[in-house]
Image: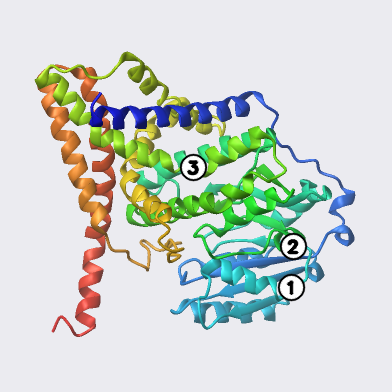
Amino acid sequence: MDLIAIVHTFAVCALAIQALHHTALLLVFLFGSKPRPCFSRASSASDALPRVTVQVPIYNERAVVERVLCAVAAQDYPSDRLRIQVLDDSDDETRFIVCRVVERLRAQGVRVELIQREARQGFKAGALAEGLRHTEDDLIAIFDADFVPPPDFLRRAIAESAAFADPHVGFVQARWTFANAEHSAVTRAQKVMLDVHFVVEQTARASAGLPISFNGSAGIWRRECILDAGGWQADTLTEDLDLCYRAQMRGWRGAYLPWLCIPSELPSEALSYKRQQARWARGTVQVLRKVLPMMLHAPWSWLQRIAALFHLSGYFIHAWVLLTALTTPLLVLRWMFGGEPLLPAWVGALGMLCTLPTFALVLAQRAQGVCWSDSLKALPFALALGIGVSLSNTVAMLSALLNLGAGTFERTPKRGALWRSPYPLRADWTLWAELLLACYSGVAAAMVFQHSAWLAALPLLLYSLGFGFTAAAQLLALAQEQPRRIVAWRRSGRGV
């Protein structure tokens, strides 16, 4: 085999291995035991509940900040055992909104502490660490600005789950749901993909005793666990994943509560989604580099080590998808017009294995009561978006592998009840590269179709639709944003 065939075969093999891993998690989810609440009336008595500090880290979220603060303040929890910390690093009008809301809540008798740092040192990790220094409470709950916890969250997560009755449990994580999932095709695709993680994978890992992830929000930490694991650290862009792995390698366990659902908000535009995914991809690889040497000495079985390795290397799937998208057109066209053999049959068989994770996409929807037809309707959008972000995620991972610093924590702006986000984003060079990739695969697919090689054209068409859908969604967002940019430009005086 020549270089192109070798690269393609390597990528297909890597995808097949990851597909088998996801299939194993799916089987555990289908046939393993599920975490269930173990409610005890005695444990829910007010005098038995531990003291809790709820931290709300905020940076320039004027569209959603009031909503989350009011939801946190409405918790059905003894007022003398509940403290709210607003960790506000904003440098826009969000700062004034926060001050106004905090004053109003204080007037209502809510214990709210406002911490506003002059410098955004350490980003979210730095804000959480600063808040931790100002409290001695046993438990620390965390909510990002776009979450809306129901009033009974703390009681259910602490008393109903009884998770912290186990002294080895260091954190609990609730399941995310998505209030704006039906906003657009982009949000519907995100929901389908994220449901695989929250409905299938997290549940399977928890039931099998494998390391689970803390997802940064809608969870509660034991303060002792945070300190024992080394505290919040800002040397990666996914401080939540970093801390939960350090904690679990110290012997602590995480508890997952799939029956406790917390509404959140998905990025409403493809530009925001790409930014979020690039940060997660870069941060996950940074965590992999950081904790990989520690795994050798962790009190884990080999199965737990292997599961952790698959978990932390999950974003490499995007690199393998990108490689197959680049090599498949060349191999197919060379086979058609040059007569050279395509690839050994066993490579094609491995390629079929790569389709196994699509079952998890559908079954995660079925587990939530979504009918078969609606589950299948959302599948093409999820596959397209997953392919479409493979380039930008690969670029982000390469920066982590090359150790180009921790990077800047660029938060994903949310729109709340507004028609569009008050924080418009700009496209980068990857948009134009995605358009080129869509054309590259599309032209190859058209040439193959002309020769009636329908089966060979299918993967080419899938790549073209994936990159084309993601690029088109970004162009649509930019077009909708253009009138506002023109108004702002004219108001600034530069348009005169």
Give the percent coordinates (x, y) of residue 181: 45, 46
What residue would you read off at disc 1?
Answer: 135
Query: Callout 3: few (<14), some (14-19), or many (20+) C-alpha neighbours within 10 Å?
Result: some
**Marks 3/2: CA–CA distance:** 28 Å
Q: Is residue 463 left or right of residue 105?
A: left
Q: Earlier in the sequence, mark 1 or mark 2?
A: 1
Q: Amino acid at mark 3?
A: Ser
Q: Amino acid at mark 2?
A: Arg
Give the percent coordinates (x, y) of residue 321: 34, 36
Residue at horizontal 38%, vertical 38%?
382
* SS of the residue under disc 3: loop
Q: Earlier in the sequence, mark 1 or mark 3?
A: 1
**Between tags 3 and 2, which lies in front?**
3
What residue would you read off at disc 3?
Answer: 313
* SS of the residue under disc 2: helix
Give the percent coordinates (x, y) of residue 131: 65, 73
- Residue 28 placement: quadrant: top right
Give the percent coordinates (x, y) of residue 450: 9, 21
* SS of the residue under disc 1: loop
Query: Callout 1: few (<14), some (14-19), or many (20+) C-alpha neighbours within 10 Å?
Result: some
What residue would you read off at disc 2?
Answer: 223
Vertical placement of 138 versus 207: above or below? below
